[in-house]
Image: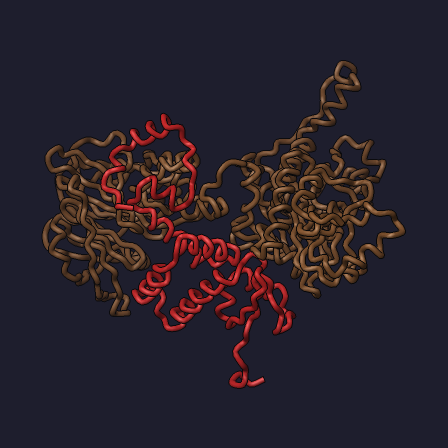
Chain colours: A red, B brown
Amino acid sequence: MSKLGQAKRIIFLKTADGQLFEVDEPVAMEFEIVKSFFDENEDAADDTVVPLPNVSAEPLAGIIEFCKAHVEFRANGAAGKDEVKKFNAEYIKEKSNEQLKELILAANYLNIKEMLDFLTETIANRLKNKSVEYVRAFFGIENDFTPQEEEAVRKEYEWAFEGVDED
Amino acid sequence: MEEEEVNRPLVLVHRPPNFHFPFRHHLATQFNLFDPLDSPDSTRSSLLCRHAHNIRVLLCVDPTPVSSDLLSLLPALELIVGSTVGVDHIDLPECRRRGITVTNAGVAFSEDVADLAVGLLIDVSRKISAGDRFLRASSWAKTGDYALGSKLGGKRVGMVGMGKIGSEVVKRLQAFGCIISYNSRSKKSAIQFPYYPDVYELAVNSDVLVVCCALTEETHHIINKDVMTALGKEGVIINVGRGALIDEKEMMKLLVRGEIGGVGLDVFENEPHMPKELFQLDNVVLSPHCAVATPECFNALEELIVFNLKAFFANKPLWYCDSSVAMYNAPVHKLGDSQMTLSPEFRGEPLIPGLPDDVALNCLLRLPVESHATCRAVCKRWHLLLRNKEQFFTHRKELGFRDPWLFVFATDKYTRKIQWQLLDLTHYSWHTIPAMPCMGSDVDCPLDLVLKYDMQKNRWTVMNKMITARSSFASGVIDGMIYVAGGSSSDLFELDSAEVLDPVKGSWHSIANMGTDMVAYDAAVLNGKLLVTEGLERMKLRVYNSNTDSWEPIEGPPLPQQICKPFAVNAGDSTIYVVGQNLHVAVGRISRLSTSEEKWSFRVKWHVVDAPETFSNLTPSSSQVLFA
């Protein structure tokens, strides 16, 4: 087979809600779980559909967008440059906290380290300089301190409650 | 069928006759359970045929065989929810062909199975059951001393199978001081223990084999005569996987001849039958395939099954589904493995609702230290996690975080007191660490004392002394070696000498002199080269090449004006950090223009991090970048 004549290989992925995605091979190989599937099944047919029963279509679409851009950055030698930072900031800006959580769950299952690092870092950054109440609301965490306990904990670190951002 | 039942999703129950699973009643309130065994024998197959086109889910209770014959009766089947860890009773190639997803229950069981594996190993090594029999037979008074046991710590344990159960076993055995290595279908990049692609090689290098892999065609009798012989006369085998993983006949021969040290078995080839000879042997500990038999385990199993059934009918992602089980029968272990395991343990709240605890931890361990105080007050589990820096950094180490922190050694210009300040180079926020012990308050007093700060322990320890006592000297780290250069000596002479510490051996030795006496140096390491600057006067730079043991002069770029003398310089990962008066920091991203080894030229882009006002009295004297 001539290299020139070789078409780009497409990987088929099927989500939990039954949607079929066609993804360029280099992008799909960013997903460790898909990569190991093909590593261990070298004889897998080209039209094999890889089921992703833990991922829905919406986050998968978002993940493909992110990985595609990063694969291109690497190919252009732009990795680690400002361009990448700009893309990442734009990418995450419009995402709600719920979407962010879904992306994290999916990236975790697909085992995409670079993206997971970026997403978890984003969560940490969104919590910077925020009040206790904001953090609780952000994550839907129930306050399990008794009022007395909470007062004691807050007193311990009183200075930290000054200068937080307006929620 | 009753009216109400029709509205609930249909689930086919596939179970052994005479076995009613404990949470059936609870499941029946949420799902329409269709159990052919409830009907008389004669009507079963026609009943199944009538409902077959509606059956999308099969709940497989216990290792009840799911054959291709059964599968062919169920054309609409999409999901098999297994209630066991192993799924060797399910025709996986057929499921793969049909695109049927198979879930197993490994996550609900692994901790309990690991507990039993460790229990069996301790029992075999320390002869607990045998000692119990010894006493019950009143042998102590008659025959006196009892045989010696064998210590668990220091044993080389070879894991055959490194899935969820395997990693739980390892977690426990590490605490006993065992030395771990493993065999599995493929090397796992996330696991740092030595990997043996061949079980025989693993056995040669182990004192104990813990068998906890899935039973497949490839792993049938994986522990054969050769492997057992390689393990040797003192060797111990623990099996909590499946009986047929060990060649039982060969094992019996070797045990009877004393050619293996002992075995602890929870599973057998032909359960509930087992070779009678086992009962005669004191170096054998037996357990009736009960590794998962705890109420906690059944609760977790119920939770897992209900979750997966609900998720399936709601078209939502399954909580735990090893698609590899469905697809190619090779357990691939992922970060998300602990999604279920933590829940039975902390039946209370997760760290972050909606995220598995390991992922939540991954987020929280990235919190800048300045946000810790606020976040501690969020809830009890966060308080526990962020309570102190020691714990925080220990957790970070466990999860393999390595972010840079700039340690700045500074003097207060009024009190002359010295202190360390830390700049988090990811978030550019400052925090403090405990004061060093036993250092004088005067920064100008030369010392030969070297102290080690451990980020994980948040404390200082004393290292070996330097050859020459110095003050205001430069230092840097290359390939794990600490280099110091210049400074003032005890008699206030300026020094041109330099020396190096191997932190592992704790020993110092001298390296080439710089050729010029220089005081108040500071140093930065960049691309394996030690850069030394004159800190008080003009920016004089020298570079030390550790490969050739030589010093070269070098040209440097101008600094932003906010950064006032004296400087403390450090670098890492193509970035140079210059700490100036009042601890304002200039961060310069450096790209090397020249490729020549001798001459370096830089292009630098500066970015200034302002220090809080409270630092306005501080003068930096040294800085270090560390990863934690």
Residue furthest to the top: B141
Residue displayed at 50% across by 46% down: B356
Q: Position of residue A19 (x, y in %)?
A: 56, 66
Counting the numbered discs, the total is 0
Towards the viewer: B553 or B66: B66
- A160 or B393: which is nearer to us? A160
Query: Residue B37, position in %: x, y?
Result: 82, 47
* Residue in front for this viewpoint, A164 or B404: A164
Task: Using residue A141 as the reference point, say whether residue B616 is left or right of it.
Answer: left
Position of B615 with respect to B31 (left or right) is left
Where is residue B103 drawn, in percent x and y?
65, 52
| B98 lies above or below B387 | below
Q: Quarter-wise, where is residue A115 in the image?
A: bottom left
Q: Is residue B320 visible?
A: yes
**Residue at 77% across, 30% down:** B282
What residue is at 78 percent from the left and 39 percent from the top? Answer: B255
Give residue B456's quadrant in the image.
top left
Residue at 81% across / 38% down in the picture?
B256
- In the displayed structure image, the side of residue B58 where residue B406 appears, left or right: left
Please determine whether, in this image, residue B99 is positioned above or below residue A145: below
Q: Residue furthest front?
A: B3
Looking at the picture, tell me which residue is in the foreground, B585 or B132: B585
Considering only vertical position in the picture, is A5 above or below B324?
below
In the image, is A14 to the left or to the right of B427? right
Q: Is residue B245 visible?
A: no
Residue B143, percent across and down? 77, 18
